[in-house]
Image: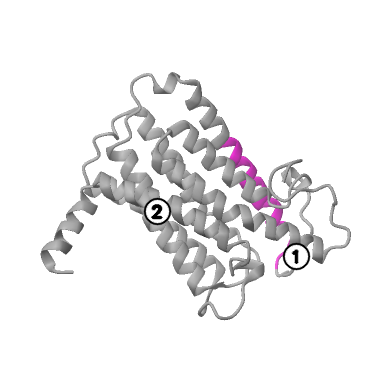
């Protein structure tokens, strides 16, 4: 790529060009389909499924911090370095705040609460890092420059439904993470049957919570980038919940037979 073409792309990126944001959104949907197909035969190789052949290992706490922090930092950099005409509107501030709050918790609190986490292979780690860079740019950029909600958006029932779903999903996710952490005492490794909260109904309570969270974000926001993010999240961690369910049932003879994989009473 020659220098003029490269400079043109750099300018498009810094100007939050709508073509780039739409391109990222459609690719997120496309790769969501690819991921859900691939994960029918492959377990994403981190955590309990970590194995050789995916590069050198990265400490779990370091991996989670480094891979998640771009989704928090990139929107803030966009606020500082780019034109943000929509940030003056209250709905845009709310949506940006919700996104940043999630990723602040995910990058700066969650990793340092991990107990006995297995190292993450380098390839899944770097893929997660790239995703968070691009998604932070996509969600932040669209909210800051293009998302136009109008003066009545905050009085729309859709907005309140989405916010309720987002907060409910985040609560489920945080509670599930707390339950999983406390299965292990300090210095312990290994796995136990999680009990309490939504784990009484599904094996992937933490995944269900995050899916509901981003569903709520998409419902309240109603834009292509937020739908693409929700869809990719569903395609990426939905199958992992099913893998966990199968793994628990194979490992523990006394695993609750009525417990589902991802959606209470259904799946």
Side (left or right) of 167 relative to 183: left
Residue 11 position (above or below residue 140): below
Q: Between residue 151 and residue 1, name the one nearer to us.
A: 1
Sequence-first disc among 2 and 1: 2
Residue in the picture at 63% in, 66% down: 41
Residue 123 position in % (x across, y down): 48, 72
Is 177 magenta? The answer is yes
Q: Residue 251, which numbered label?
A: none
Residue 241 position in % (x across, y down): 66, 55
Residue 111 position in % (x across, y down): 55, 60
Q: Residues within 10 Å of mark 1 (few under 14, many from 20)?
A: few
From the image, tell me which residue sits under label 2.
27
Side (left or right) of 89 relative to 121: left
Which residue sits furthest left?
4
Is 150 magenta? The answer is no
Residue 181 position (above or below residue 160): below
Residue 178 position (above or below residue 96): below
Side (left or right) of 77 relative to 56: left
Figure label count: 2
Span highlighted in magenta in the image: 167-186
Q: Between residue 40 and residue 3, name the one nearer to us.
A: 40
Q: Residues within 10 Å of mark 2 (few under 14, many from 20)?
A: some
Q: Residue 191, which numbered label?
A: 1
Marks 2,1: beta carbons within 8 A: no
Q: Does the magenta stretch mainly form a helix, a strand or a loop?
A: helix
Residue 164 position (above or below residue 108): above
Residue in the picture at 47% in, 31% down: 220
Side (left or right) of 148 relative to 177: left
Residue in the picture at 15% in, 61% down: 7
Q: Between residue 231 and residue 142, name the one nearer to us.
A: 231
Quadrant of the image for the N terminus?
Answer: bottom left
Residue in the picture at 59% in, 66% down: 44
């Amino acid at each position: 790529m020659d220098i003029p073409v490269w400079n043109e792309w750099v300018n498009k990126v810094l100007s939050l060009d709508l073509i780039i944001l739409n391109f990222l959104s459609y690719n997120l949907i496309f790769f969501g389909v690819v991921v859900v197909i691939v994960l029918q035969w492959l377990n994403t190789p981190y955590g309990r499924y970590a194995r050789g052949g995916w590069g050198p290992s990265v400490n779990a706490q370091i991996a989670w911090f480094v891979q998640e922090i771009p989704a928090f930092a990139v929107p803030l950099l966009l606020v500082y370095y780019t034109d943000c005409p929509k940030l003056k509107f209250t709905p845009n501030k709310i949506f940006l705040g919700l996104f940043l709050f999630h990723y602040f918790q995910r990058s700066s609190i969650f990793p340092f609460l991990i107990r006995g986490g297995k190292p993450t292979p380098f390839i899944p780690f770097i893929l997660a890092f790239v995703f968070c860079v691009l998604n932070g740019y996509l969600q932040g950029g669209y909210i800051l420059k293009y998302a136009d909600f109008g003066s009545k958006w905050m009085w729309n029932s859709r907005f309140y439904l989405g916010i309720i779903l987002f907060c409910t999903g985040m609560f489920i996710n945080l509670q599930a993470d707390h339950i999983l952490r406390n299965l292990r005492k300090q210095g312990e490794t290994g796995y136990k049957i999680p009990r309490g909260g939504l784990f009484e109904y599904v094996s992937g309570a933490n995944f269900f919570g995050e899916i509901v969270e981003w569903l709520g974000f998409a419902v309240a926001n109603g834009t292509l980038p937020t739908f693409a993010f929700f869809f990719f999240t569903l395609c990426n961690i939905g199958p992992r919940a099913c893998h966990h369910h199968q793994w628990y049932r194979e490992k523990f003879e006394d695993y609750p037979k009525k417990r589902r994989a991802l959606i209470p009473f259904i799946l």
